[in-house]
């Protein structure tokens, strides 16, 4: 039976029944007369012959190629297939060469900083100690200097004296009055002066004042020269000598710790002189004259 043409569902053009598409608009027409082809197997597979197991390959996750199932590495790119092999852990940060260098450098820097800090601290402490010591020394020196002064003499005892020029004239503070005494004929009986202080003193030095130089009394009297000095706490004599000059002489250094008395023995003198000429000559006296004796030191507290 002849097949009749079919109208196109899109453009209504007549289409041959065997055409799948409309020749006018290209609309899909389908083929009604075609049926699915059927096949019948002559027989199933033999029971004694096992089916071949389909062999599955391993797909490389890196390049996408398929590799045999027993491969561990991709044949194309060499990447690891399947489960990853055990990988050694990364070394800790301290074991890498770069980090070891950095750590050593940091350690050295920290050591230098610590040493510098300690040095500065010690130097600061040392400087502070030196400053404190210097300040203390200055303070002590200033205090000592402030305390050093004339010792108070409460009594003078001389081995000899004239009534009108007594021993007490040695500490009356007047340079125009003097102690006057005869020179002993026996050298073993030297003139001595013992001064008693109002309290214990750390004596530093002694000042002796002669009469005014060039005057008649200065020239005609003996002046002290060699001295032997002791104190209540100093039994070993200290020797000293004086210039032959008028007024206050150079200080005689004599250090003690705590002295309450001071003894000065005059062992030699500058001799007296005659003044004038001819019948007007005035002979020198065989006497010794001293205007003042002052003792300087620090009183005990």
Image: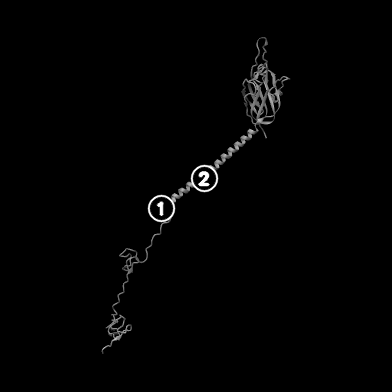
Q: Which residue extends farthest right?
A: 163
Lower sequence index among marks 2 and 1: 1
Residue tagged by mark 1? Answer: 98
**257 relative to 287, above or below:** below
Residue 168, by quadrant, is: top right
**297 relative to 160, above or below:** below
Pinpoint residue 64: horizontal percent, then vertical percent: 33, 67
Callout 1 secondary element: helix
Residue tagged by mark 2? Answer: 118
Task: Report crowding for label 2: few under 14, some 14 to 19, many 20 or more residues within 10 A (C-alpha).
Answer: few
Q: Which mark is residue 195?
A: none
Pinpoint residue 184: horizontal percent, then vertical percent: 68, 17
Callout 2 secondary element: helix
Residue 176, by quadrant, is: top right
Residue name at image x 41 percent, y 52 percent? 98
Task: Mark yes or no: residue 120 visible.
Answer: yes
Q: Which residue extends farthest top?
A: 279
Residue name at image x 49 percent, y 47 percent? 113
Pinpoint residue 104: horizontal percent, then vertical percent: 44, 50
């Amino acid at each position: 039976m002849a097949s009749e043409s079919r109208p196109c569902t899109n453009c209504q053009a007549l289409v041959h029944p065997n055409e799948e598409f409309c020749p006018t608009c290209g609309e899909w027409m389908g083929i009604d007369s075609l049926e699915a082809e059927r096949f019948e197997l002559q027989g199933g597979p033999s029971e004694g012959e096992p089916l071949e197991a389909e062999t599955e390959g391993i797909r490389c996750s890196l390049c996408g190629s398929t590799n045999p199932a027993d491969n561990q590495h991709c044949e194309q790119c060499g990447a690891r297939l399947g489960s990853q092999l055990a990988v050694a852990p990364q070394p800790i940060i301290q074991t890498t060469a770069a980090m070891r260098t950095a750590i050593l450098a940091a350690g050295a820097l920290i050591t230098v900083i610590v040493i510098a800090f300690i040095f500065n601290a010690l130097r600061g402490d040392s400087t502070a100690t030196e400053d404190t010591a210097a300040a203390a020394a200055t303070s002590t020196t200033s205090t000592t200097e402030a305390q050093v002064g004339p010792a108070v003499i409460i009594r003078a005892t001389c081995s000899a004296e004239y009534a009108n020029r007594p021993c007490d004239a040695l500490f009356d503070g007047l340079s125009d009055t003097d102690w006057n005494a005869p020179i002993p004929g026996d050298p073993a009986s030297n003139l001595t002066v013992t001064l008693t202080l109002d309290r214990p003193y750390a004596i530093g030095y002694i000042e002796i004042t002669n009469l005014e130089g060039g005057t008649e009394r200065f020239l005609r009297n003996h002046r002290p020269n060699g001295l032997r000095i002791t104190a209540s706490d100093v039994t070993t004599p200290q020797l000293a000598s004086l210039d032959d000059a008028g007024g206050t002489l150079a200080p005689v250094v004599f250090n003690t710790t705590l002295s309450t008395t001071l003894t000065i023995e005059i062992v030699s003198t500058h001799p007296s002189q005659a003044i004038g000429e001819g019948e007007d000559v005035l002979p020198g006296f065989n006497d010794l004259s001293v205007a003042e004796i002052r003792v300087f030191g620090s009183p005990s507290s």
